[in-house]
Image (spheres, grey):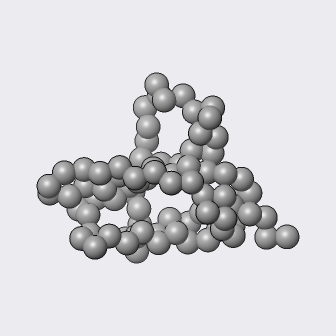
Amino acid sequence: VPVQPLSPLEIDFKRKPLELSYFKLEDPEAFNWDVEIVYTEVNENSKIILPEKSGGYMYVLKANWKQGVADYGFLVEVMSSN
């Protein structure tokens, strides 16, 4: 999905999760999956501000509900504003 730098990414679930966090990969092909992944909490407005630097990014969301946990992954292409 092509987007402008620093665009807000709004996350909307029909049923709001108890916790919502994410991590971002700047180079998914070079990522070492053996390292510990550190998630960042999504702000209370359920928005993530996308990077300023152009390039491809992979995001992984982790949503926790009373009934269980779900992970979602997606790709974002940040395009130069020039």
Horizontal side of residue 19 vs 31, given as left or right: left
Identified at 51% across, 54% down, the residue is 74
Q: Does residue 82 appear to the left or right of 51 in the view shown?
A: right
The image shows residue 78, relative to residue 13, as above or below, that is: above
Is residue 32 positioned above or below 19 on the image?
above
Residue at the far left in the pictured view: 67
Name above or below for residue 65 compared with residue 60.
below
Taking the spot 19% from the left edge, 51% from the top edge, the residue there is 68
Q: Residue furthest front?
A: 1
The percent coordinates of residue 69 (x first, y second) are 25, 50
Quadrant in which the C terminus is drawn? bottom right
Q: Quadrant of residue 32?
A: top right
Front residue of 25/71: it is 71
Is residue 2 in view from this perspective? Answer: yes
Label count reads 0
x, y percent for residue 79? 74, 63
Q: Is residue 51 visible?
A: no
Residue 54, percent from left and from top? 74, 57
- Nearest the viewer among 73 and 4 is 73
Q: Residue furthest right?
A: 82
State which quarter of the image contains the N terminus: bottom right
Task: Please state the horizontal and vertical placement of residue 67, each as a whole percent of the image.
Answer: 14, 55
Q: Quadrant of residue 37?
A: top left
Identify the residue at horizontal 29%, vertical 51% (top origin).
Answer: 70
39 shown above or below 54: above
The residue sitting at the top extreme is 34
Query: In the picture, residue 15 is in which quadrant?
Result: bottom left
